[in-house]
Image: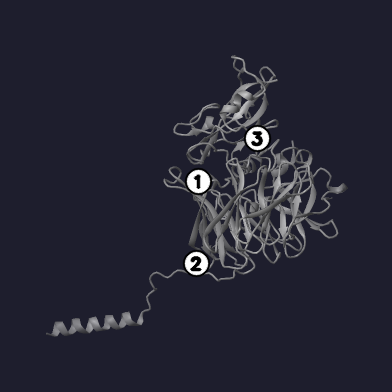
Amino acid sequence: MRVLNWITALLLLAGAARAEFAADPLGQVEPLPERWPAHWVLVHDIAFEHIMDGKTVVLDLDAETPADQFKGMFNSAFAAFLAQSRTRPEIYLAETYYSRGTRGERTDVLTIYDKRSLSPTGEVVLKTNRAILLPQKFSMQMTSDDTLALIYNFTPAMSVSVVDPIAKRYVADIPIPGCAAVFPTGQRSFSSLCGNGTLYTVRLDADGQPAGTSRSERFFDPESDALIEKAAWHAGRAWFPSYHGRWQPVDFSGDAPRIEPAWSMLDDETAGWRPGGLAPAAAGADGRLYVLAHPEGREGSHRDPGVEVWVFDPSARQRIARYPLRLPGLTLALTRDAELLLVINVEMQLDVYRASDGELLKTIAGIGTETPLLVFGAN
Amino acid sequence: MNWLDQWTERRLRGIAQRSSRRSFLGRLGGLLAGAATLPLLPVARGADKAPESGDPTSCDYWRYCATDGFLCACCGGSASSCPPGTEMSPITWIGTCTNPVDNAAYVISYNDCCGKSACGNCSCTRNEGDRPIYQPQLNNEYNWCLGTEHQTYNCSVARVIGKAD
């Protein structure tokens, strides 16, 4: 009896101790805010050597340590295309999967991710004709009214898929023979750059179906000085760098693109330099243009990394600064407030510079990425 | 020697090669809509083979003047054959390379071998003659595993298909 009393007392004590101990909750998952801070970015790692299993990492550039910078990630299969909604907390990926990983039945899909959970919340199955190429921003874009996703296809037939991510509906597959990439035009149209030196524009009706097409005059010569389709883009305007160092501005804000006079990036000081890289140009809220540049340009150097970033005032058509880079850069982007200049360098690290004066603020490495080729400022 | 060579060349090239992908690029390249079009090329198609010299596992090998990707000769295949279990893409990119033995120009077909993940060995990239994606026949950013059962890219071969006239 005495022993039983002791056991009872011990059990009571243990119970009391448990009641006072706040155990970690089971199953807790961190949320993210609906509107991401201005210095959050998305780093797209295509994982080139196991490309079916790429990923996109969300980073907070204001945080001090890699552990704190890493806010989460989501998978991005087979050199996925990525676009962010401007009005909904959503990210869209155009992906390709095989039923057995690298083989089996192919499925192309627009995957809808919720920015608050980084979870897929829906999808639209696509035709199996999505272009698979090195990642770039103009492979997929949202229409300017943010209602339709435009996806570039290449089989090698060239076309653009129109997808409604709100109704989760595949709308149309529109041929764009001899043309590539998508540049949102007007409210619901798009344009593509063509091998004959023109822009081809498709007007979409209220349902997203093609309602008419137009073609610009020939305004560049792809043979003598090709325009790099990886343009600097801001607020419906594009500045295309050319192989030999011109800026070609195009205003896409109206129903038809308005081609403006091209001007040179170069002067006596920089003769022989050229723009280059995988994503060589950026524009943003500060109204300035940025481009990666390298000296001793030659045939084939248009994807060489830049040793400097040049800053231009497009209204004055003048270079206003040259920023030497810590390491040559392949990819350039800005945060949405244009305060931070983002450079993926040749070591596959993310160098963060202050956009206003080119000071290196930090280098982000060791975050589990392999071949991060593209970076996006959070919308 | 250009400025690139002065930067930690080996590391730089390794990364540039990985990031630049695979594929086919040539000074006088052209996109062929399938192997059936190959006989239409304006090349001398004699029975003789091109004389050989050099190392097909090296990026400096003469046939690779316009390649971009992993060399199949380092991946279980050869300069002209795919590794086991892959499928050769019939849609190719054509380059013209000078053979150092006879100093003659040969037309090279850079077919991709497809159906497995990237081999990852012996990457080799050149961008001479490369043009943006709106000129696909001259662009090496595309995955050219087209017309194959699967579009996964493993490596690239460099098939000599004739003398360039």
Q: Which mark is residue A180?
A: none
What crowding class fits label 1: few (fewer than 14 Cα within 10 Å), some (14-19), or many (20 or more)? some
Q: Quote the CA–CA distance across marks 1 and 3.
A: 23 Å
Please indicate, yes or no, whether residue A86 appears anywhere in the rendered image: yes
Marks 2 and 1 sit apart, C-alpha to C-alpha, by 25 Å
| Front of the two marks 1 and 3 | 3
Residue B75, compared with residue A306, is above or below; it is: above
Residue A50 circle label: 1
Picture quarter with the N terminus of chain A = bottom left
| Residue depicted at 68% across the width and 53% down the height | A212
| Mark toward the start of the polypeptide (2 vs 1) | 1
Question: Where is residue A140, by image quadrant?
Answer: bottom right
Q: From the top left corner, tell me how far across and down residue A224 is, in percent.
A: 79, 39
Mark 2 or mark 1, which is nearer to you?
2
**Side of A64 where A315 appears, left or right:** right
In this rendered view, identify the residue nearer to me: A73 or B8: A73
Q: Could you tell me the amino acid type at mark 1? A: His
Q: Mark 2 lies on which chain?
A: A
A16 to A357, vertically: above or below:
below
The figure's colour scheme reads one colour
Q: Which chain carries label 1?
A: A
Q: Which amino acid does label 2 sit on?
A: Ser
Name the residue beneath numbered marker 3.
B25
Chain under disc 3: B
* The C terminus of chain A - image quarter: bottom right
The correct choice, above or below, for A72 with respect to A19 in the image is above
Where residue A196 sits, quadrant-wise, is top right
Tell me the SS state at disc 1. Answer: helix
The amino acid type found where label 3 is placed reads: Leu
Residue A117, disc: 2
Q: Dot 3 lies on which element?
A: loop
